[in-house]
Amino acid sequence: MDSVKVKFITMDIIIQSLGFKAGDTLEGFINDKVSGLKSDHIVRANVVLYKGADSDPENNYCEIRLEVPGKDHFVKKHSPYFETSVSECVEILTQMIKKSKDKHIDRRIGDKTILDDALMEDDINDEDVELEDVVKEARP
């Protein structure tokens, strides 16, 4: 019988509430929402909750920073309720992750296309060409 090894990578979720004590239900809501983000590259999620000025009715702020290799993703939203702010942040982060993943895939496909074109061009010239030479020419 074949055994399959599954590797689960869990991200750290750090929740900070500035100026008040966040309840267990709010922290549970945040953990559920943030852990639903789908990416293998997320190392840590830093969630900061705070209240703005009392004169502003939409004064409940949420900031989420996703630590990923390369550039971190950061979103800041505010609304009358922390739950709404968290949900809006997670929706935007989902779009950012998808955009980043699509950009990475497009870059890999582009590199392959450049290499294929260079190899085809060298085949037309009927010269013996090493792959290393093609890679050096194709990359700036």
Image: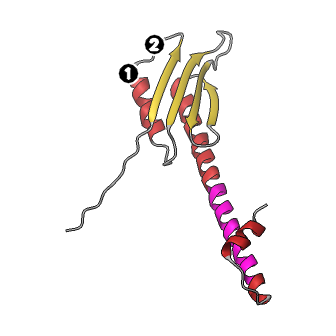
Residue in the image at 54% along x and 31% along y: 86
Numbered label attached to residue 21: 2
**Residue 120 location in percent, x, y?**
73, 83
Residue 118 part of the magenta segment: yes
Mark 1–mark 2 Cα distance, whole angstroms, equals 9 Å
The residue under label 1 is which amino acid type? Asp
Numbered label attached to residue 109: none
The image shows residue 84, relative to residue 91, as above or below, that is above
Residue in the image at 37% along x and 47% along y: 8
Q: Locate residue 133 relative to residue 76 in the image: left or right.
A: right
Per the rendered image, the range of residues in magenta is 102-120
* Mark 2 residue element: loop
Q: Which residue is mark 1?
A: 24
- Prevailing secondary structure class for the magenta stretch in the rendered image: helix
Contact? badges 1 and 2 (CB < 8 Å): no
**Residue 63 location in percent, x, y?**
59, 27
Residue in the image at 54% along x and 35% along y: 87
Q: As rendered, which of 6 and 18 lies closer to the eye?
A: 6
Q: As rendered, which of 25 and 68 lies closer to the eye?
A: 68
